[in-house]
Amino acid sequence: MLEVLNGFLLVYFLILCTLSALVPVLVKPIAACFSRSSYEERKLWDEILTIKAEQRQISMKDEFAAYSKLQRKINKLEVVLKEKTQSRLNKTSAAKGTIHVVFQAVIAITIIVSVIFYRREPIVALKGDLFPFSTFLKYPSDTPNAISTHMWVIMSNVSLRTLLKPIVS
């Protein structure tokens, strides 16, 4: 029912379409490299834990002034830590977006250039007559009942994105 005319292009475009669909999954581990907490954040967190441990040693009823002073210090350090963490998360989000756009652009350019370069190459030929669709599916190839590179990329992209949707989401 199906005859593969160009196996290399079939696999090549399947791989490119799969990579294009999996870009969000591939970006996550790369962006994770940018999201590690800094030395300053870890130092602030350690200092907060130390002060909290010191605060637990003090009786709130007996030494309210000392207890409150430590609490104000903890609050101040937590605000600074929160600001640093938010700044890091914003940078991580920007890096993630940039990496995502770059990957998609590289893959899209590769697909477009390849489709233009191999535009007259049929990928597969179907047995039987596909009368109303045959000209549309084979364009610009001259092979009867063939599926051209353009159509193969579109069909592969749609089907792979549909199949990989549970993984990517």
Image (tube, rainbow, N blue to C red):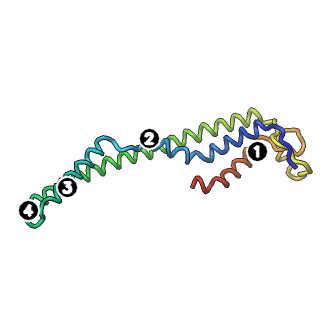
Q: Position of residue 31 (x, y in %)?
A: 47, 43
Crowding around mark 4 (Cα neighbors within 10 Å: few <14, some 14 to 19, many 20+) is few
Residue in view at x 17 percent, y 53 percent: 73
Decide: is 107 above or below 83. above
Q: Mark 2 — residue?
A: 33
The tag on residue 40 is none
| Element class at badge 2 | loop
Q: Residue at x 58, y 52 (%)?
A: 168
**Comes first in the chain, label 1 or label 4:** 4
Q: Amino acid at mark 3?
A: Ala
Instruction: Name the residue that disc number 3 marks.
Output: 53
Mark 4 highlights which residue?
63
Residues at discs 1 and 4 in contact (Cβ within 8 Å): no
Give the CA distance from mark 1 to mark 2.
Answer: 36 Å
Say which mark, if any, is on residue 152: 1
Gap between marks 3 and 2 measured at Cα: 32 Å
Q: Nearer the viewer, mark 1 or mark 4?
A: 4
Q: CA distance from mark 2 to mark 4?
A: 45 Å
Disc 4 versus disc 3: nearer the observer: 3
